């Protein structure tokens, strides 16, 4: 490493920042006056930038610095002026107070028997030779490496303690279906996995993940990995599947697996609570209060066709592949504007919501990965939080302008997404139903676009294909996901028929994808004009 300190304005430090930018953005001509996000950066790449700067320059940058710096030069100047905190090796504590999200989930579940289970899963079809014994050994190696997977929880006097249990055993459940007629095996395998992912966990008895393998033939298996959110999140799944592949390969070669090393989740949880007590909670709440205003109803969104006073029953889903022309138009605009599919589709959704509801300010619910600290970017645990990006939508302006505005609000939301939404709501609106700290009861529209987490699983010579098991709604409102795997994108809508009839959801989903295609293909025209000439419905009160 150079003898220069990270706070000196040296050509070496600037050259290092430029090289990191060029490598992350895959652009060789980035100069000191270029902006990270204007040249194609996004929140995920920003997390990697923070980590690379810590590793190569020994400086821990704040997320705010990265998200608001106008150029590489300004980033370097802010780093110098702020006396940025030197990066240090994390501690390795495995016990302590649960993180804020974990504590909220445990206490909410104890007080609300109808609270959702908060689980997630990944399912695969594995084609090729597979050794179940090696897979079980690899699962055990992964659990031994990542303490969050073998952590239990105990509620005590209004708080929750987490404790890692050394030597926790991981068993691989195996079902055999080779005896069935060949044309019946896949359907039965999916049924077994669907049943498996709905089984809940005992949070006092780790591990809080499990694996279920279904053998259809020597070279054809189905696999489900199931997690309690207390142990992991989507980002964690990429870490875990990479380590699972590494461990499987090492064990097959008779070697000791070398798996991902990272900071301990319990240490991160302690830092989170420290920040909250030192004023970060009020800081985040103040930002969102400025964006949302004093009325908790800002988080509520009822689309035309919503059935009032219907309660929550009869969960349903709508799932299908996104047509190739929609994906092509989306990718083309992303390349042109150097932005992400998430930003473009979120902008299209906000445009459609504004058209349908007449709102000029649109708040949607989404998630932030919350991997802002470089020490913990490879840590398995529950980091992700809900955020509420709010954008002023002017349908008379061109779509490119809206995409830029949405990108700015999404980045700002990410920078203020380091605390769970329940705590933020409680600080914003104390004493109200919205701020009571329990599970969300008011309807809204949730949206997310991301690559399939864990989509790169490789076990020896097998080829892993994602299997999309049926999903069900677990909270009010309309939940929309777009999941990418290679060139393909899958669309899912989760809802309760007691709130939205099937026909309303089908029409809205159709019009949303049509809006994505039309707006992405004509970003220089006024949004209202594009939506009128395409066929997203302008019949705002059609279902009123």
Image: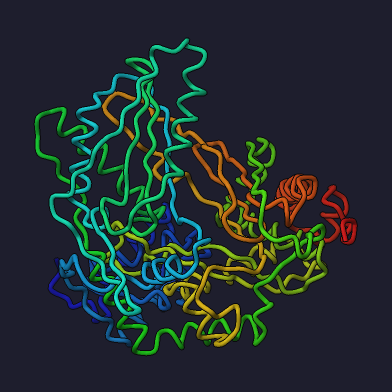
The C terminus: image quadrant: bottom right
Q: Is residue 64 left or right of residue 379?
A: right
Q: Is residue 532 left or right of residue 345?
A: right
Q: Could you tell me residue 8's position as x and y percent? A: 24, 81
Residue displayed at 35% across by 47% down: 238
Residue displayed at 77% across by 73% down: 360
399 or 283: which is nearer to us?
A: 283
Q: Is residue 409 left or right of residue 164?
A: right
Res 441 seen here: yes
The N terminus: image quadrant: bottom left
38 or 281: which is nearer to us?
A: 281
Q: In which quarter of the image is residue 384?
A: bottom left
Vertical side of 277 occupied by 481: above or below: above
Vertical side of 134 occupied by 442: above or below: below
Q: Quadrant of residue 134?
A: top left
Q: Which colour scheme is used?
A: rainbow
Q: Total of numbered circles in the picture?
A: 0
Q: Could you tell me residue 71's position as x and y percent? A: 45, 73
467 or 476: which is nearer to us?
A: 476
Q: Could you tell me residue 523's position as x and y percent? A: 73, 56
Residue displayed at 52% across by 74% down: 412
Residue displayed at 32% across by 33% down: 458
Residue at the limit of the structure toward the left, as seen here = 255
Res 14 seen here: no
Q: In this view, does 149 lie to the left or right of 257?
A: right
267 or 198: which is nearer to us?
A: 198
Vertical side of 358 occupied by 515: above or below: above
Vertical side of 19 occupied by 212: above or below: above
Q: Could you tell me residue 258's position as x and y percent? A: 15, 44
């Amino acid at each position: 490493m150079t003898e220069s300190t990270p706070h000196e304005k040296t050509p070496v430090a600037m050259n290092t920042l430029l090289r990191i930018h060029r490598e992350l953005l895959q652009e060789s001509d980035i100069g000191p006056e270029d902006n990270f996000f204007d040249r194609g950066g996004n929140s995920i790449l920003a997390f990697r930038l923070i980590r690379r700067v810590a590793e190569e320059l020994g400086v821990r940058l704040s997320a705010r610095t990265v998200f608001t710096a106008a150029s590489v030069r300004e980033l370097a100047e802010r780093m110098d002026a702020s006396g940025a905190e030197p990066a240090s090796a994390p501690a390795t504590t495995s016990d302590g107070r649960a993180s804020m999200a974990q504590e909220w989930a445990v206490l909410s579940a104890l007080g609300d028997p109808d609270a959702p289970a908060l689980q997630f899963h990944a399912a695969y079809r594995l084609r090729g030779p597979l050794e179940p014994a090696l897979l079980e050994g690899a699962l055990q190696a992964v659990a031994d490496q990542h303490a969050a997977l073998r952590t239990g929880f105990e509620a005590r006097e209004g708080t929750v303690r987490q404790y890692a249990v050394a030597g926790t055993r991981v068993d691989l459940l195996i079902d055999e279906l080779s005896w069935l007629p060949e044309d019946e095996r896949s359907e039965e395998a999916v049924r077994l996995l669907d049943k498996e992912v709905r089984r809940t966990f005992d949070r006092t008895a780790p591990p809080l993940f499990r694996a279920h393998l279904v053998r259809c033939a020597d070279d054809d298996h189905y696999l489900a990995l199931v997690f309690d959110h207390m142990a992991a999140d989507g980002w964690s799944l990429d870490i875990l599947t990479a380590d699972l592949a590494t461990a499987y390969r090492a064990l097959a070669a008779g070697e000791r697996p070398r798996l991902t090393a990272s900071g301990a989740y319990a240490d991160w949880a302690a830092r989170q609570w420290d920040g909250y007590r030192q004023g970060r909670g009020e800081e985040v709440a103040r930002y969102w209060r400025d964006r949302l205003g004093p009325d908790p109803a800002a988080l509520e969104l009822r689309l035309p066709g919503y059935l009032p006073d219907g309660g929550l029953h009869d969960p349903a889903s709508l799932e299908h592949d996104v047509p190739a022309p929609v994906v092509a138009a989306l990718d083309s605009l992303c390349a042109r504007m150097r932005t992400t599919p998430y930003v473009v589709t979120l902008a299209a959704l906000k445009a459609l919501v504004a058209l349908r509801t007449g709102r000029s300010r649109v708040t949607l619910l989404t998630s932030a990965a919350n991997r802002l600290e470089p020490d913990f970017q490879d840590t398995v645990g529950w980091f992700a939080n809900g955020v509420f990006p709010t954008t002023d939508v002017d349908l008379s302006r061109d779509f490119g302008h809206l995409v830029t505005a949405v990108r700015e609000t999404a980045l700002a939301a990410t920078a203020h997404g380091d605390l769970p939404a329940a705590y933020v709501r409680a600080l914003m609106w104390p004493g109200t139903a919205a701020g009571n700290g329990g599970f969300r009861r008011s309807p809204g529209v949730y949206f997310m676009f991301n690559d399939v987490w864990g989509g790169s699983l490789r076990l020896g010579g097998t080829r892993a294909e994602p299997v999309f098991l049926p999903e069900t709604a677990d909270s009010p409102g309309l939940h929309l996901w777009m999941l990418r795997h290679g060139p393909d994108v899958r669309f899912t809508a989760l809802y309760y028929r007691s709130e939205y009839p099937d026909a309303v959801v089908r029409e809205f989903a159709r019009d949303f994808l049509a809006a994505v295609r039309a707006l992405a293909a004509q970003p220089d025209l006024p949004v209202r004009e594009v939506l009128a000439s395409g066929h997203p419905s302008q019949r705002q009160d059609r279902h009123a």
